[in-house]
Amino acid sequence: MRKTTDPRAPRFAALLLLSFGAAACGYHVAGRGNALPPQWKVLAIPAFKNRTSNYRLEQRLTQAVVREMISRTKYHVIPQPQDADAVLEGAVTSLETVPMLFDQTTGRATLMLVTMSLSVKLTDHATGQVVYQNPRFIFRNEYEISTDIPSFFQEEGPALDRMSRDFARSLVSAVLEKF
């Protein structure tokens, strides 16, 4: 009985070696890395500043960033900068909503594009060195809205919460991976 080899075997072996090599070179799934100093244990996230006219927007954003940082890292997160290894500060500089789709029968918007601009800075508290900074951190996302007027106003709070969570995911990923 004669033994035959699969002609795909050399390609499979090369692909396997390449994947092991890529894994050893520091590649990782986006959104799961942490390029911050390993000696940090406590991270302060004081309330973001709000330079827009949107009431309490900074509170929702700060809370969402704190929740996201706690869920994705092992840092102890506190609001007081003086007791922390590092401080993450943010200021909302603009918030713009633009209608993108309209209901053909009512003429009301059904899809909005939200664009938010922030100034963000992460500082090593001991040295004063800025570890991450983005004076124009832009967050954009599309959100569907109801054409029913009474439910539209009831949706505002949950819509802002959704936007805050989406923003927090984006910001925490950028900070952790130093993008």
Image (tube, rainbow, N blue to C red):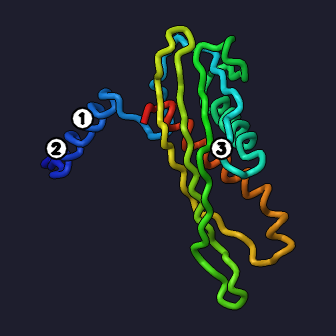
Q: Position of residue 47 (x, y in %)?
A: 71, 32
- Residue at label 2? 10
Image-based side of 8 in relation to 151, left or right: left
Amino acid beneath label 1: Leu
Is mark 3 in CB contact (under 8 Å) with mark 2? no
Q: Where is residue 167 in the image (x, y as percent from the top left)?
A: 60, 46
- Which structural element holds mark 1? helix
> Dot 3 surroundings within 10 Å: few (below 14), some, or many (20 or more)?
some
Image-based side of 28 in relation to 142, left or right: left
Is mark 2 in CB contact (under 8 Å) with mark 1? no
Q: Where is residue 154 in the image (x, y as percent from the top left)?
A: 84, 64
Amino acid beneath label 3: Arg
**Mark earlier in primary sequence (2, 1):** 2
Residue at the bottom extreme, as displayed? 105
- Residue at label 1? 17
**Mark earlier in primary sequence (3, 2):** 2
Q: Which quarter of the picture shows residue 147?
A: bottom right
Task: Name the residue at 78% across, 60% down.
Answer: 156
- Which structural element holds mark 3? loop
- In the image, residue 84 sits, relative to residue 111, either above or below, namely above
- In the image, residue 128 sits, relative to residue 32, either above or below, namely above
Q: Which mark is residue 51?
A: 3
Task: Name the residue at 45% across, 25% down.
Answer: 35
Front of the two marks 2 and 1: 1
